Structures are given as structure tokens and as C-alpha cells.
């Protein structure tokens, strides 16, 4: 039995990570070394999806872009 670990994420991180994981999980040629890696990615995507209150918002893509902008390292 595995011990559970909690990780705290900001709403911006949830949005950005969910979108990235969704793309990764949709691509069949990603090259998971073991099916357990794919299962863990699917499980994480599901957890992020349930923690994503903006998922069905009409301005979802604008929110994702704004979150990316806030997280991105500043140039300079």
C-alpha cells in the first residue's frame, strides 16, 4: 500500500499543468516506458481536472493564457 502525499498548487499552476497533461495524455506516441507511468499521468490529469473550477468557463482559454503569463519567468 502506497502512502499518500499532498502537493499544494496555485490555481494558475492547476490550469497550466492540466492543459499540458491533457496534451501529453492525448498523444499515443509519447513513449511511456511502462504503462504505470501512463496510469499515473492519467490519474494526475483527473485530479487536476477536478480541482479546476474554470474548466467550463466561457473564457477558459483566456484564463489559461493569463495563467501562463503569470507563471512564465520574466525576461530581463
Image (spheres, helix red, strand yellow):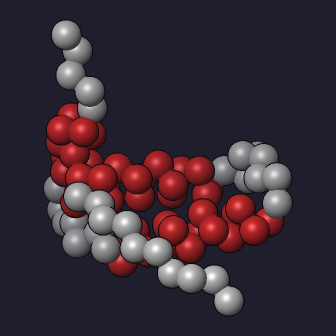
Which image quarter is the N terminus in? Answer: bottom right
Q: Position of residue 30 (x, y in %)?
A: 72, 46
Q: Relative to 70, is 1 on the left or the right?
A: right
Q: Toward which corner of the image does residue 59 lie, by quadrant? A: bottom left
- Residue at position x 47%, y 75% from top? 5
Number of callouts: 0
- Residue at position x 41%, y 58% from top? 18
Q: Nearer the viewer, residue 66 or 6?
A: 6
Is 53 placed above or below 70 here? below
Q: Toward which corner of the image does residue 9 lie, by quadrant? A: bottom left
- Residue at position x 80%, y 65% from top? 35
Any part of residue 53 in sight = yes
Looking at the image, the residue that sits furthest to the right is 34
Which image quarter is the C terminus in? Answer: top left
Any part of residue 61 in sight = no
Q: Relative to 5, is 62 on the left or the right?
A: left
Q: Position of residue 31 (x, y in %)?
A: 78, 47
Q: Position of residue 34 (x, y in %)?
A: 82, 60
Q: Toward which corner of the image does residue 57 lie, by quadrant? A: bottom left
Looking at the image, the residue that sits furthest to the bottom is 1
Q: Position of residue 14 (x, y in %)?
A: 32, 59
- Residue at position x 47%, y 49% from top? 20
Is 37 placed above or below 47 here? above
Amino acid at each position: 500500500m502506497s502512502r499518500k502525499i499532498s502537493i499544494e498548487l496555485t490555481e494558475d499552476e492547476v490550469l497550466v499543468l492540466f492543459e499540458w497533461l491533457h496534451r501529453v495524455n492525448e498523444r499515443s506516441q509519447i513513449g511511456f516506458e511502462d504503462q504505470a507511468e501512463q496510469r499515473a499521468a492519467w490519474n494526475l490529469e483527473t485530479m487536476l481536472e477536478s480541482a479546476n473550477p474554470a474548466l467550463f468557463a466561457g473564457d477558459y482559454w483566456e484564463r489559461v493564457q493569463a495563467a501562463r503569463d503569470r507563471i512564465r519567468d520574466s525576461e530581463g
